[in-house]
Amino acid sequence: MMPKVTPAVVILGNNSIPVARKIISVLPGAQLYGLAGRTSNVDISFTEFGTTLRELFASGTPIIGICATGIIIRTLAPLLANKRQEPPVLAVAEDGSAVVPLLGGLNGVNSLARQIANVLGVKPAITTTGDIRFGIALEDPPAGYRLANPEHAKSFMSDLLAGNSVRLEGHAPWLRNSSLPIAEDAERVIQITEKQVVSTPTRLVYHPATIAIGVRCTLPPPRKRGGVPDRAGWGSEEIALVQQMLADAELTPASVAGIFASTLDAANPALQAIADALNVPIRFFTTDEIAAISQNQTTDVAVTAALAASSGELVIQRELSHLSCAIAIAPQPIDVSTRGKPRGRLAIIGTGPGASDWMSPEVKEILRNATDLVGYSTYLGLLGSLTKGKQQHESDNREEIARARMALDLAAEGHFVAVVSSGDPGIYAMAAAVFEVLDQDAKPEWQGIEIQVAPGISAMQAAAARIGAPLGHDFCAISLSDILKPWSIIEQRITAAAKADFVLAFYNPVSKQRTWQLAEAKNILLNYRDPDTPVVLARNLGRDGESIQVCTLEHLAPELADMRTVILVGSSKTRTIQRCDGSFWVYTPRRYEEDKSV
Ligand code: SAH
């Protein structure tokens, strides 16, 4: 079986990048690790090869080292204690001419080697005898089958290699069509079954992923603890029912392919709890699909879902007050990716002000996994290779509500949508737009979407970091754009902030059409602040053409700024320190003593 954790492709120099990229093209989500100073444009840059490799190995991450086998072997040698827990480890020649599986025979190294060799157009250096002689690896069955007794696989294979034959009980074309020495009267047995059976050294048991569990579960009324819904313990009753039903039907949980339900129940935490307990995915059918399948008869949704997922036979069904559960068995393993859809996900992410250095690992992870990106074309353009292979829904910067609605609709169809904002998504950006739409429209099909906001570094933080610590004490942010709010409000806020002696961060200070607002803001501030108050103008932070300028309030002028500038205006305490090159640090001290002289 292929490992679930996404692999790490490790390189020591830029020469390996073409081969690394080819490998990553067939391993979606794989991360490129590169030695600092020798590689560029990698996902993760490391300085200590040994420590990095050992950490990856210890965390069970499949490792593809584009380097000599010897260096991998020597690095990992001290950790080679438990064969069963080894992730796959492979060495690939820098020119892509050799793919050598080294470790992780029980965890899919040979299939990984075949996959990589295939994209590189070479033959993998597979050395496992069973693999070569019979064309299969008993320890590493194809997707859809789980080996119940891997501890017996090696000696079983040795027996077959020594001349013994084997009888097949049950249905598995990959075994039937292999070169295994199959004989009806053989003593050794390979059994394929979804039943709970005893496995022995002479009886290998594979559990096919043929069981579909359909669940309909209405959400219990939220139990509240201090105003916050208490999610602890949700699902325990439902998990117990499913386990009891499997036991009563003498079925093994190892054969469960997935949980299947209606999209209307998608947000129900009990469903996720059942899936987590069985370690299987959940897939959803829309209400239209369910109606079509049940031909509009009043069949239970759980039964309909189980039958639709399995195209098989109903085995058992039970109901509790809020819960109905049905188990059906398919004639062959169920490929869950072809049945129903996953729960839709909408991640509203902030990519930081500029390039990837200021992007959080969480945001990078979301970008790697999302299927669809929604955003202003300039921001999507800044993401470069991170957008590769994804459906892009670009739009004009002003159509925020339309964009939010489109993102929710896409997610409701089962896509994993990332709505991309620059800076922080919650600061003058898309997160609030999504919640506005959600609040106003509340379409039923949006209820099941899993929504997540992933923060980013906002322009004011980046500007502050570049120039020192101007936001070191209380501050506020004001957008000078009067598109979404009247100027009278902006005016009031600047006055209030000036009176309260906040440091101010001005977003959207000017645009081509709007220049008078900044001049007006300056005039208001001059009523309360010294003309010498330090002002920071930071433009294109983290991007090409970045510039940071310090001036005094008196000299602040609309010509110094544009729509890619954020402006920080100091409080009465904000100070500057001259650096040896003549430029300034700007900071606001943390202590704020009352001015007793007034
Ligand atoms: N969500 C963004 C803000 C979007 S509003 C954030 O948290 O940063 C757009 C305004 O943000 C711009 O007019 C400018 O004032 C500021 N801004 C965004 N990116 C910037 C950058 N790279 N450099 C300077 N200012 C930036």
Image: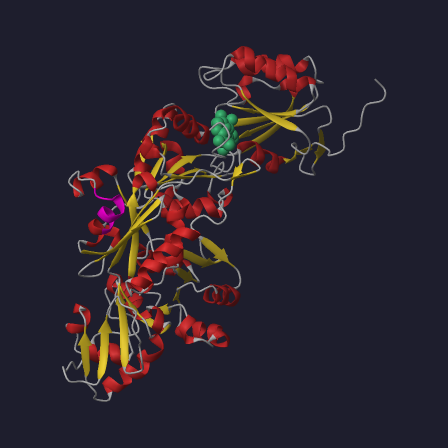
What x and y, as percent, mark residue 119?
Answer: 25, 61
Q: Inspect this view and state whether residue 216 appears.
A: yes
Report the number of numbered marks.
0
Decide whether the magenta segment is chiefly helix, strand or loop.
helix
Work out whether residue 68 or residue 479 is closer to the camera in this orientation and state it: 479
Quadrant for residue 162, please give it. bottom left
Q: Which residue is painted at 48% across and 48% down in the image?
A: 361
**Could you tell me which quadrant the N terminus lies in?**
bottom left
Quadrant for residue 442, please give it. top left
Q: Which residue is painted at 71% across and 28% down in the image?
A: 574
Q: Please give the range of residues in magenta.
A: 299-306
**Could you tell me which quadrant the C terminus lies in?**
top right
Residue 5 is covered by the magenta coloring: no
Q: In this view, does 180 lie to the left or right of 33?
A: left
- Rendered image coloring scheme: secondary structure
What x and y, as percent, mark residue 29?
Answer: 36, 53
Q: Inspect this view and state whether residue 41 appears.
A: no
Q: Is residue 445 above or below residue 485?
A: below
- The residue at the far top in this view is 488
Residue 301 is covered by the magenta coloring: yes
What x and y, as percent, mark residue 165?
Answer: 19, 85
Work out whether residue 87 or residue 527 is closer to the camera in this orientation and state it: 87
Q: Is residue 527 above or below residue 169?
A: above
